[in-house]
Amino acid sequence: MRKIVFLDVDGVLNHQDWNQRQPKRPSGSYEEAFIRRIDPECVARLNLITDMTGSVIVFSSSWRQGKPWQESARLLRRTGMTGTMIDRTPLPDEHDTTVFAHYEGRPPEMFEPYPRGYEIQQWIDAQSFDAAPTIVILDDDDDMAHLIHRLVRTDPETAGLQLGHARRAIGMLNGS
């Protein structure tokens, strides 16, 4: 069975305490600025999840907009990420509003903005899995709609991804 981590960045791999300790006016390249925004301790906890479960990563962060997800995967590897990122969830211009009707029975205009849970569901529905994947969503927001039970919600203010979050995600992915 396929195990998948849907990964947000802000509030998961960084947090306000971390960001406030970084230089106010970072100099250097886009790559250097990207890497500085990532807390290596949070990355180590993400690695624990992927190492202990054999899961792969799908990028669900708003950071997937503007640059190809492969570029973000490469930069996250430079921060120490060892897991394999295989794809990203749909971008706003790729939203399939029929997902709303299927899962909520309500017209899409009743949902603004488009909940991240539906982006994740749209990605899952577009795959050809032999069996439904086991998923966990690492995010600091709760806009997961019908997938809320798969959310491990992090603290964007002071902590990001913590060991307790990692343990919960491992348990969810390994069925314990």
Image (cartoon, grey):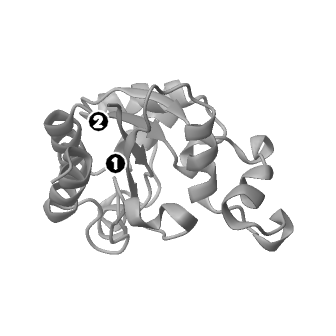
Q: Residue at x 30, y 63 (%)?
A: 160
Residue 100 appears in which quarter of the rendering? bottom right
Q: Which mark is residue 104?
A: none
Does the rendering let one see residue 89?
no
Q: Quadrant of the N terminus?
A: top left
Q: Is residue 163 left or right of residue 73?
A: left
Q: Quadrant of the C terminus?
A: bottom left
73 vs 60, left or right, is left
Where does the image place residue 112, in percent across and percent down from the top left? 76, 69
Q: Is residue 9 left or right of residue 53?
A: right
Q: Tell me the residue that label 1 is attached to.
A: 38
Name the one closer to the observer, 157 or 126: 126
Side of 83 where 11 appears, left or right: right
* Residue 38 percent location from the top left of the image: 34, 48
Q: Residue at coordinates 19% horizontally, 37% vertically from top-left?
A: 53
Q: Quadrant of residue 151?
A: bottom left
As helix, strand or loop, the secondary structure at mark 2 comes to: loop
Q: Callout 1: 10 Å neighbours few (<14), some, many (20+)? A: many
Q: Nearer the viewer, residue 139 or 175?
A: 175
94 and 73: which is toward the camera: 94
Residue 79 shows which numbered tag? 2
Label 2 crowd (10 A; few <14 / some 14-19 / many >=20): some
Q: Position of residue 45 (x, y in %)?
A: 19, 49
Q: Is residue 140 above or below residue 82?
A: below
Q: Amino acid at mark 1?
A: Ile
Badge 2 amino acid: Thr
The first of marks 1 and 2 along the sequence is 1
Most distant residue in the front direction: 131
